[in-house]
Amino acid sequence: MKTYKYLLLLIGLSVTGCSDLVEEPKGLLAPEGFFQTTEDIQTAINATYAHAYNEQIWGRKLSNALMLRSDMAAFRPTGSTARRVEMDTHTITDDNEMVYDPWNRIYRGIAAANEAIAGAALVDVPDAEKNPVVAQAYFMRAFYYFHLVRLFGEVPYLTEPVTATTAEAQAKINKTSAEDVYKGIIKDLEFAEAHLPNTQPARSLPSAGAAKSYLALVYLTKGDWQDAYDKAKEVINNKAAYDYELDSDFQNLFNADVIDASKEPIFALDYNNVEASDNAYDQVAPMTGIRNNYRFGAGNGGWAQVVPEIKVFNDWPAGDYRRAVSFDDKAVFFGDHDSNEDTPDEAYEVNYTEFGTADGSVHEQALARPFIAKYYRFPGTFARGAVRATSHNPSMMRYAEVLLIAAEAAVEIGNQQDAVTYVNLVRARARAGGSWANDYSNTSVPADISGTVTVNDVLEERRYELAFECKRWYDIARRKIGAQAFGPNGLEVRPEFSDADYLTPIPNTEIDSNPNLE
């Protein structure tokens, strides 16, 4: 993936949400005066990507919320930030900023997509030239709505620019049924599938393969098993055309220095050369990293806010290379380790069982448990102090997930042969090990599945393969397995979990300004 720099749309196009229908315009140029060429359409589309980078979505707020709501991660127990505690304990209130910030930012991304689509209609060029460009906006609109409908269920479904700011105009905005939102998502992805090229200069630009892959996941989420299987198979059978393949080394997928050369990412967010512009930078690394850890260089470490459930680590087969990549169970701290005033400060390594103890970590926030290593171990050249920003381009979808989508759908339609094949392809890559921990190379863990594959087998494989990649909560919600996941035998025990917890409350500020959303 080559570095792809995006320009923010700083002209007078309205970027709208539901509670704040139009932002203060930055200029006076009307859409009719701006949209003249396909390059103008692309400039408008670039604004849709920029919102996803923002800390209110993938930079921190939404990504962290999805991890905390799952059964694999928890908020650092010594902390007291109410908004994160609510996410972790499923006691989410409608004034939680990890709810309303993503809501508002996602709708701004949707508004930017709507502006680009509407503006494209003003460009007088043949559809064959215009559609491959505007199809990016359709893809991103589907991307944003797919998050919204899984989080909130019924939401306002807006497909045209909103220009009026009056209370009367706002009162016309109503919730749309989840089924109709899904119909819109599928329609947008089908347009993208039909018009996007098979490959793009960067994986941060959606391709036809990305549209097919998301269609497969949308169908899987809806329980349309045959459609999910068929669409995933289209990707698998044409992987050469789309330039997809499993990376030979699982660690490469989380190494900012090499990820751009990998063929596994299908759609990614590009944080290269995006720094502190409207909070558009990656903060997942510091949120998950070990506080005061010098293992990967001075100044690295993190804020230790989102940590793994200890049972996730303990129950994960120790021979699985993905476990070594996903966690850090050691850290290097710097200071007076033995409390001897005659001994100068020095670097010392400790096991996770010593984190937070008098003889271990020098910081109370380094809890006695392993930490999530996928995002801060190899943060790239763009990393800053405490890896507050990184060059890591997180995959929103990668080829391994397509294989597991096909496997899960295959189980549901009774195709055991394909289910076994696709799960074992993912497992074989894990067995091959890689550069991070050579002692994991060519092990027998995880062993191939033989015999019958169950839905639970595939869900467990997704849990290992996609650990801490913000997928697990959506799996729990779409399969309605919260009672088991948070039950007495679950990875995280939350006996008060109820079916109401599958959906997120709509922000109270939205309901106050528009009772139709209550």
Image: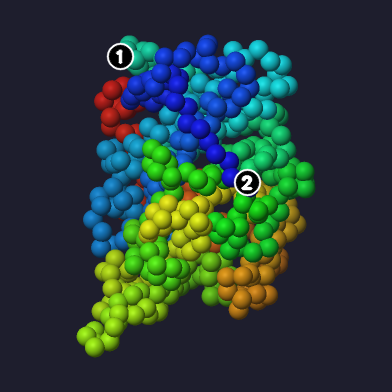
Task: Please name the residue shown 56% across and 16% down the image.
Answer: 35
Mark 1, secondary structure of its residue: helix
Q: In the picture provided, is 494 more to the left or to the right than 225?
A: left
* Kind of residue indicated by mark 2: Lys
Towards the viewer: 249 or 470 = 249
Say which of marks 1 and 2 sits in front: 2
How many numbered tags mark residues here? 2
Residue 315: tell me if it is visible: yes
**Residue that label 2 marks:** 2
Residue 229 on image: x %, y %: 69, 44
Towards the viewer: 207 or 123 = 123
Task: Please name the residue shown 52% across and 47% down the image.
Answer: 272
Q: In the picture provided, is 62 more to the left or to the right than 317?
A: left
Towards the viewer: 37 or 110 = 37
Residue 222 on image: x %, y %: 56, 39
Task: Check if mark 1's residue and mark 2's residue have beta carbons within 8 Å.
Answer: no
**Residue that label 1 marks:** 167
Q: In the picture provided, is 373 more to the left or to the right than 448?
A: left
Mark 2, secondary structure of its residue: loop
Dot 1 crowding, Cα within 10 Å, few <14, some 14–19, many 20+: few
Task: Please name the residue shown 56% across and 66% down the image.
Answer: 322
Residue 315 on image: x %, y %: 48, 71
* Kind of residue indicated by mark 1: Ala
Work out how far the residue at label 1 is from the one at label 2, CA to CA, in angstroms: 45 Å
The image quadrant that residue 231 belongs to is top right
Q: In the picture provided, is 34 more to the left or to the right than 426?
A: left
The image quadrant that residue 354 belongs to is bottom left
Residue 394, numbered circle: none
Residue 486: tell me if it is visible: no
Dot 2 crowding, Cα within 10 Å, few <14, some 14–19, many 20+: few
Residue 356 on image: x %, y %: 29, 73
